[in-house]
């Protein structure tokens, strides 16, 4: 049975992981040790239902690190240092909020800490444990509709207030797109970036550079094309995925918020009746049950993260393509104007 320590009790820790963890504990009580969830966040007030600790050392005194799963819910730019501190305290099982890293330097540092300390890291890309994603993967693998030709993922939600209040993400590529990338890679395999676009978030009073809309086109090595469109300035919420096969089109809708864990899937086959299904899809709870089940193994292998590394590589390339061109040196400007 495993204890839980949540590091970082902001939106992800308190708002997402904690309620899903409560449902996971109810669903699979034999996985979880009795007693309260431990929480460490020196910058936020205590949270109901969490036993606050003042340091990682105090957390280790209350529950043995070797019997504890850490939920690392802090911004990604401070992640490698915290992973090293957790490893130094004796923790090895760590669930990390997405994205795993913001750039290749951060990814290399996390890889170094992981290898040197034997960390077993699981990235919280819960869309991979979604009931909708499982149905889509089954359609791709079993091939009833022929070959997969394209994937289109739309992620729309208004995120003005939170972006202005908690600027924890450098670009719109780092907010929702990692979830979509994980699904695209799972469905169609490795890919290269064909095109990327990034827009600012603009209101009457403010401009948040790079935090408005992110678009990404991928060319998968298997020949599939993927388009991801994430608009954080949209007036409506929508998480939609469309798979086009040789002989059918599948349109799925992921749940849009914690208020309703219901997904929908429509299958359209030319010349046949459209099939429409509506089903429960609490992806984060399913992800946590899956992660704790694996961590409960007395000798689990150190987790490898090829899909997450691929996602970070693609995100880095997309942001590079969208970066403004460097200003030319003064002498180059003078030469260009004939000075």
Image (cartoon, rainbow, N blue to C red):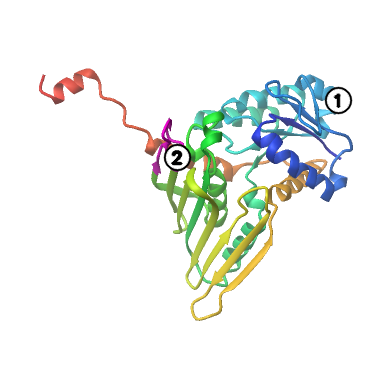
State the separation of the CA atoms marked 2 and 1.
Answer: 43 Å
Q: How crowded is mark 2: few (under 14 residues within 10 Å), some or many (20 or more)?
A: many
- Tell me the residue that label 1 is attached to: 62
Secondary structure of residue under mark 1 = helix
Residue 212 tag number: 2
Horizontal and vertical percent position of residue 307: 57, 46
Residue found 14% across the figure and 22% down from its top? 335
The quadrant of the rendering that contains the C terminus is top left
Q: Is residue 68 above or below residue 55?
A: below
Outermost bottom residue: 271
Horizontal and vertical percent position of residue 235: 49, 48
Q: Is residue 240 above or below residue 231?
A: below
Front in this rendered view, residue 279 or 161: 161
Residue 176 located left or right of residue 286? left
Residue 256 located left or right of residue 314? right
Whether residue 108 is visible, yes or no, is no
């Amino acid at each position: 049975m495993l204890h839980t320590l949540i590091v970082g009790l902001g939106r992800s820790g308190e708002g997402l992981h904690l309620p899903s963890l409560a449902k996971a504990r109810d669903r699979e009580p034999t996985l979880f040790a009795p007693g309260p969830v431990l929480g460490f966040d020196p910058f936020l007030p205590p949270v109901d239902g969490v036993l606050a600790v003042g340091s990682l050392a105090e957390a280790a005194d209350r529950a043995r690190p070797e019997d504890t799963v850490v939920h690392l819910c802090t911004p990604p730019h401070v992640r490698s240092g915290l992973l090293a501190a957790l490893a130094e305290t004796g923790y090895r099982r760590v669930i990390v909020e997405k994205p795993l890293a913001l750039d290749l330097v951060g990814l290399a540092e996390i890889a170094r800490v992981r290898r040197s300390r034997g960390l077993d890291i699981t990235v919280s890309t819960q869309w991979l444990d979604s009931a909708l994603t499982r149905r889509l993967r089954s359609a791709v693998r079993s091939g009833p509709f022929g070959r997969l030709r394209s994937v289109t993922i739309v992620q729309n939600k208004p995120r003005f207030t939170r972006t202005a209040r908690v600027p924890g993400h450098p670009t719109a590529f780092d907010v929702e797109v990692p979830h979509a990338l994980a699904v695209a890679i799972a469905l169609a395999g490795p890919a290269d970036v064909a095109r990327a676009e990034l827009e600012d978030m603009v209101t009457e009073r403010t401009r948040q550079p790079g935090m408005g809309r992110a678009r990404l086109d991928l060319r998968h090595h298997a020949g599939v094309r993927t388009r991801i469109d994430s608009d954080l300035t949209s007036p409506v919420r929508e998480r939609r995925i469309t798979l086009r096969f040789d002989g059918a089109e599948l349109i799925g809708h992921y749940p849009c918020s914690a208020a309703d864990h219901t997904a929908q899937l429509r299958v359209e086959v030319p010349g046949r009746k459209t099939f429409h299904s509506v089903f429960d899809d609490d992806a984060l709870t399913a992800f946590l049950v899956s992660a704790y089940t694996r961590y409960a193994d007395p000798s689990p292998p150190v987790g490898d993260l090829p899909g997450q590394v691929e996602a970070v590589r693609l995100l880095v390339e997309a942001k590079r393509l969208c970066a403004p061109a460097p200003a030319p040196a003064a002498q180059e400007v003078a030469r260009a104007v004939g000075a």
